Amino acid sequence: ELREQVDPSTTLFCVGHTHVPLVRRLDRTLVVNAGSVGLPFDHDTRAAYARLTRVRDGWHAEIVRLPY
């Protein structure tokens, strides 16, 4: 389903509003969802944000968690 929505030439695709943090490769594309600050669906109640870093061969992403 996601493959149908992402242009295959895209190297980074950031989404949101699902309340589930995600960092996943889909072919050449790095798909990132920061999750939720106030109502996470993964039961981790800490605030979350995505940290994106440009590296030599594309992008690196990680989900960072912080206590309120």
Image (cartoon, rainbow, N blue to C red):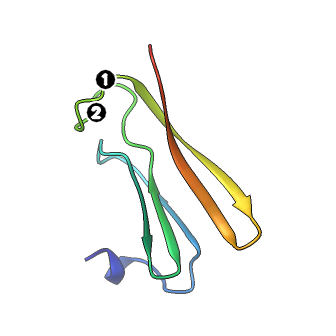
Q: Is residue 45 above or below residue 51?
A: above
Q: Residue at x 31, y 23 (%)?
A: 45
Left or right: residue 59 versus residue 46 is right
Mark 1 or mark 2: which comes first in sequence?
2
Q: Is residue 28 above or below residue 20?
A: below
Q: Is residue 10 above or below residue 54?
A: below
State the mark number for residue 9.
Answer: none
Furthest residue to the right?
56
Furthest residue to the top?
68
Q: Secondary structure at mark 2?
A: loop
Left or right: residue 41 versus residue 17 is left
Q: Could you tell me if the residues under marks 1 and 2 are in contact, i.e. CB atoms within 8 Å? A: yes
Which amino acid type is shown beneath numbered disc 1? Thr
Which percent across, then down, holds residue 30? 51, 68
The quadrant of the image that shows the N terminus is: bottom left
Q: Is residue 65 above or below residue 13?
A: above
Left or right: residue 28 versus residue 57 is left
Which percent across, then down, holds residue 33? 42, 51
Q: Secondary structure at mark 1?
A: loop
Which amino acid type is shown beneath numbered disc 2? Pro
Classify residue 3 by image quadrant. Answer: bottom left
The quadrant of the image that shows the C terminus is: top left
Q: Residue at x 45, y 70 (%)?
A: 25
Which percent across, then down, holds residue 49? 50, 37
**Disc 1 and disc 2: Cα gap in Å?**
6 Å
Q: Residues within 10 Å of mark 2 (few under 14, many from 20)?
A: some
**In the rendered image, which residue does mark 2 sit on?**
40
Which percent across, then down, holds residue 62? 53, 47
State the mark number for residue 45.
Answer: 1
Left or right: residue 53 versus residue 6 is right
Q: Residue at x 40, y 50 (%)?
A: 16
